Image: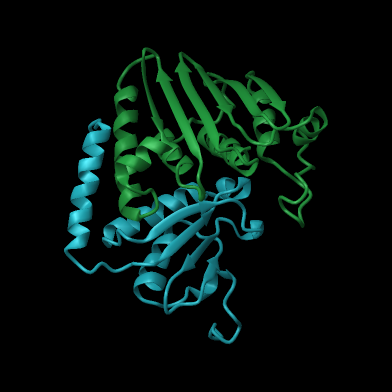
Amino acid sequence: MAKMSLEELKELRDKKRRELDTRETEGKSVQIIVGMGTSGIAAGAKETLNAFLDELDAHNLSDVTVRQTGSMGLDHAEPTAEVRMQDMPTVIYGQVDQKTARSIVREHILGKRLLEDHIFDRPAPDIVEEG
Amino acid sequence: MHYTLCDYLLDLFQNALEAGSTETSVHWEEDGNNVNLVVEDTGRGMTEQQLRRARDPFYTEPGKHPERRVGLGLPFLLQTVEATGGDIGIQSEPGEGTRIDCRLDLGHVDTPPVGDLADTFVQMCLYEGDYEVRITRRRGERSYSVSRGELTEALGELNSAASVSLLRRYMRGLEQELETMEV
């Protein structure tokens, strides 16, 4: 990967923005927040974050917001990721390894289906179907 | 013990943010078999007593995690430095900030691998809130420096997957140029 200058970075960003402006993108107002405290890092949250970014890239979901935070208080379930979007309950998923991160993008964000085996907090019990 | 040295760095950096640091500088230098790391923040700092307790794995700052009795970030690093023949110095002043100077010996068999510095530097820019981080990276004779402020200006924002994806490309380019040289 060639080294680029800040000016080249800005040009690439402007180009990307023009592309986004010409189409109605999916993924608007979707937020993914990854827990990145000591226990999250130790459990592989950095790789989880990268898996989210790669999968969002693969599906061209450029407008999804990806952020990090400290511990969410669910250390036994790290890595953890909170997903907020319209038409879906806000969910904190736990044990989000790289494979699960990719599934969250495909199932939760694109397919609007909860990954019930990985829910650790937030949705009311009546939202989650009994397995 | 963390899996890579980058994990220790991200952990220290997150401590700085949680201490309320608005300006943090990170210096990472590889020189032969040594990694010299400095993390200096403008957070709330610690008294001597707080610093002693921060070294203790069975202590965490009150209020940070209400139900928890352990805090492992700094003790992890101290343990690794001690076990692998490195050095560490911590200076802290209440109301002023904290500075951690650390040398790690990459030649020691128990020193964890460095990890992915480019991704770690990207991740240091992705926490919530308004803060600045200045990263200086040196390997032998070559070096580069970046700041969250200038990257935010170039990209407009650092929240969207599109921006983060470009930022990763940018940081990997900088890192690759350094990695092609012998030290």
Q: Quadrant of the C terminus of chain B?
A: top left
* Percent coordinates x, y for residue A127 in the rendering: 54, 84
Residue at x 30% of width, y 58% of height: A62
The quadrant holding residue B109 is: top right
* Percent coordinates x, y for residue A32 in the rendering: 45, 61
Q: Is residue A100 visible?
A: no
Chain B's colour? green
Please identify the residue farthest to the right as the structure is shown.
Answer: B49
The quadrant holding residue B51 is: top right
Counting the numbered discs, the total is 0
Left or right: B65 in relation to B15: right
Q: Quadrant of the N terminus of chain B?
A: top right
Residue at x 79% of width, y 42% of height: B59
Q: Is residue B58 visible?
A: yes
Letter of the chain shown cyan in the rendering: A
Q: How is the image coloured?
A: by chain
* Percent coordinates x, y for residue B97 in the rendering: 65, 30
Q: Nearer the viewer, residue A112 or B61?
A: B61
* Percent coordinates x, y for residue B94 in the rendering: 73, 31
Q: Is residue A85 above or below residue B114?
A: below
Q: Nearer the viewer, residue A106 or A63?
A: A63
Q: Is residue A130 above or below residue B14?
A: below
Left or right: A52 in relation to B154: right
Q: Is residue A19 above or below residue B72?
A: below
